[in-house]
Amino acid sequence: MTTVSLEPVDSVTITTLMDNSSDMLLLDQGPAKRPSLTGGPERVAARFLDTGEVGDALIAEHGFSALITVTRGDDTHRILFDAGISPNGVVENMRRLDMSPKDIEAMVISHGHFDHTVGLDGLSVSLGGSAKMPVMIHPEFWSRRRIAIPGRSPSELPSTSKSALIGAGFEVIEERQPSFLLDSSILVTGEVDRTTEFETGFPVHEAFHDEGGWQPDPLILDDQALVMNVRDKGLVVLTGCGHAGIVNIVRYAKKLTGVENVYAVLGGYHLNGPIFEPIIQATTQALAAYEPQYIVPAHCTGFRAVHALAAAMPDAFIQNSVGTRFEF
């Protein structure tokens, strides 16, 4: 594969707008800047407090969303990566963090699962009902999916309505191959090569096809990540769920860009539950071999995997929490 030219940027800031957990007692740690314990500028009534009000606390939910700000020279740009699981969770957290959806220039959705997409609703409303904003997805983003665990009734996952998304004014861009945003400052991986022996996908995941009905869909091919190259530091890799396998994703980012140094790996690593826990050790060892300066496992990584990663790379590990701002 011919490498692509990912332009170095002077800085990358990633703000966690939505994640599974919120911890208001976490302290600043390296590039991680934590929100105030007492909340942002917004206040809400609290009649049982002697002050009569309290900070408008951030929302956590089983979903993921991050705002990426890249700076190169005098230019600063912002894009949204994923949108969370509730219609208004992300826009509410943006309000509480004193951020505006109107500053977003483009969106990238990591894959079609609803815990990364539903917040497009609230974003559309906050933009006046006519978003007029590019949204980059993989063509299989629209697929109907379900979880089919042996011995249980299959559970279909809500999927995004193409007509509703386009009707709201979003400019949908479908691409399987790697593509760039913001003058080659951000790389969208597109479909990720699957090259490790142990990251074999989600065996109980199925997709519906017009011909043949429900079929196994373990690879979830629409899973894609973002990659930035911080000048003199290396690659910053941001994932949604990491269904392609976090090691596959990092390996692919290095292969695409030709950049050897891995600076930071953030997002969902999808190692939660009995299906994926058997590969925690192999994943941890392979990721540690890249010697990332920072790792921030989030969302669907799972308790056991987070602790294994923290134990293996204690100096690199940073706990994520809603509202945390990572400055690279």
Image (cartoon, rainbow, N blue to C red):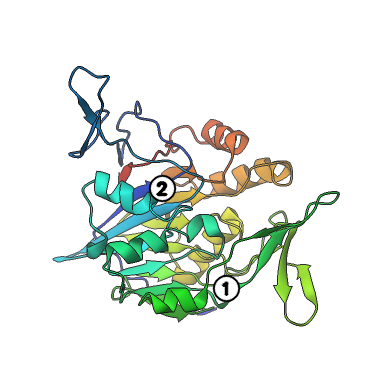
Quarter of the rendering occupied by the N terminus: bottom right
- Can you say whether 279 is above or below 70 in the image? above
- Left or right relative to 315: residue 305: right
User: Mark 2 and mark 1: span between their CA atoms?
Assistant: 22 Å
Q: Is residue 233 left or right of residue 265?
A: left
Work out whether mark 2 precedes mark 1 in sequence or the reverse, and give the earlier one.
2
Q: Residue furthest left?
A: 74
User: Is label 2 in contact with label 1 (beta carbons under 8 Å)?
Assistant: no
* Disc 1: CA contacts within 10 A as few (<14), some (14-19) or many (>=20): some
In the rendered structure, the answer to whether residue 301 lies left or right of residue 93 reads right
* Residue at the image position 57 percent from the left and 54 percent from the top: 246
Residue 118 at x, y percent in the picture? 47, 59
- Helix, strand or loop at disc 2? strand
**Residue found 81% across the figure and 49% down from its top:** 152
Taking 22 as reference, is 207 above or below it? below
- The kind of residue on which mark 1 rests is Trp
Q: Which residue is mark 2?
A: 18
How many numbered discs, if any? 2
Q: Nearer the viewer, residue 320 or 92?
A: 92
Q: Residue at 38% of width from left, 74% of height from top?
A: 168
Which residue lies under the disc numbered 1? 142
Q: Residue 99: x percent and y percent? A: 23, 52
Mark 2: few/some/many CA within 10 Å (<14, 14-19, 20+): many
Q: Secondary structure at mark 1?
A: helix
